[in-house]
Image (cartoon, helix red, strand yellow):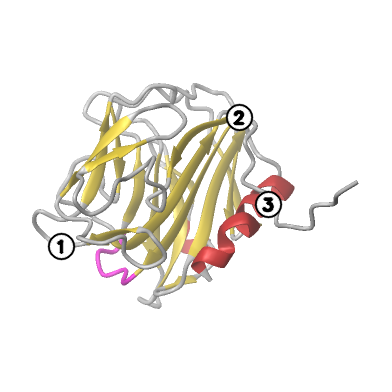
Amino acid sequence: MATNYGIPPIVSNGIIFLLDPGSEKSWAGPTSNSVTDRIGGNTGTINGDTSGSYGINKSFEFDGGSTNYDKIIFSSPSGLAFGTDPFTISVWCRAINYDNGYPYLIDFRSGGDAGNINIYFQRHSNTDEAGLEVFINGSVIDGNTGTAVPEGVWKYMTVTRSGNTFTTYVNGVVDQTGTASNSLNSPGQLRIGERYTATYYPWDGYIGPIHMYNRALSTAEILQNYNALKGRFE
């Protein structure tokens, strides 16, 4: 019997959204401004210029500028109405700088669902470091007290919900927990690299694969996902 000693693959059970700039099934490359969620079939649009190449490590590159900055927008994406059910959202990212104060990774909000989830970094007193913040009509997890993530370093950031408990992870290791009872609607828009009101807190750096699940992955599963791709980013 053959034995597989390789690295276990990305967890597939419950995955509902997968965007990977290193896969032609997600993005044809710098000549295309269209991206595709490989699981749900949702199609997004690159706005600005993300940025003429795959960036480093086959990632999207965001310029964080003050006008016409880079972002990806999915309009009315399906399959992401989490309600009060468990979920997992994970993002590979590397900040170039935190000069914008609250650089955004993912925002589920639009004008009609301003109480939906948004995930961003909050710069610490050391301006070269920031912690992951989760916000739903108020801070659920405070980025100011989270693990200090330095500029220029790839990290695998994860948020899970189980019941009313939200947990953040950095590279597969539990960081912080918080509670909220909010029901999360299907997003009118899913924005990557930008706050929903636009012109605020754009991402300056790189974003790699984004995974979303309709269940709360275990710590072991999150660590499996981290190990499956860390060779690409470390």
Circle 2 residues within 10 Å: few <14, some 14–19, many ≥20: some
User: Is residue 24 at all visible to an observer of this figure?
Assistant: yes
Circle 2 or circle 1, nearest the eye: 2
First in sequence: mark 2 vs mark 1? 2
* Amino acid type, label 1: Gly
Q: Is residue 182 above or below residue 60?
A: above
- In space, the residues marked 2 and 3 are separated at their CA atoms by 15 Å
Q: Name the secondary structure under disc 2.
A: loop
Asked if the residues shown at circle 3 and circle 1 are in contact, with their CB atoms under 8 angstroms apart, the answer is: no
Circle 3 residues within 10 Å: few <14, some 14–19, many ≥20: some
First in sequence: mark 2 vs mark 3? 2
Residue drawn at the location 54% of the way across and 45% of the way down: 159
Residue range of the region highlighted in magenta in the rendering: 96-102
User: Residue 78 sits in which quadrant?
Assistant: top left
Residue 43 at what x, y percent from top left? 30, 31
Q: Is residue 128 above or below residue 47?
A: below
Residue 122 at what x, y percent from top left? 39, 60
Asked if the residues shown at circle 2 and circle 3 are in contact, with their CB atoms under 8 angstroms apart, the answer is: no
Residue 120 lies in the magenta stretch: no
Residue 103 at what x, y percent from top left? 31, 58
First in sequence: mark 3 vs mark 1? 1
Q: Main secondary structure of the magenta part?
A: loop
Q: Which label sits on residue 224? A: 3
Circle 1 residues within 10 Å: few <14, some 14–19, many ≥20: some
Q: Which label sits on residue 65? A: 1
User: Residue 24 sits in which quadrant?
Assistant: top left
* Amino acid type, label 2: Gly
Q: Name the secondary structure under disc 3.
A: helix
Q: Label 2 belongs to which residue?
A: 14
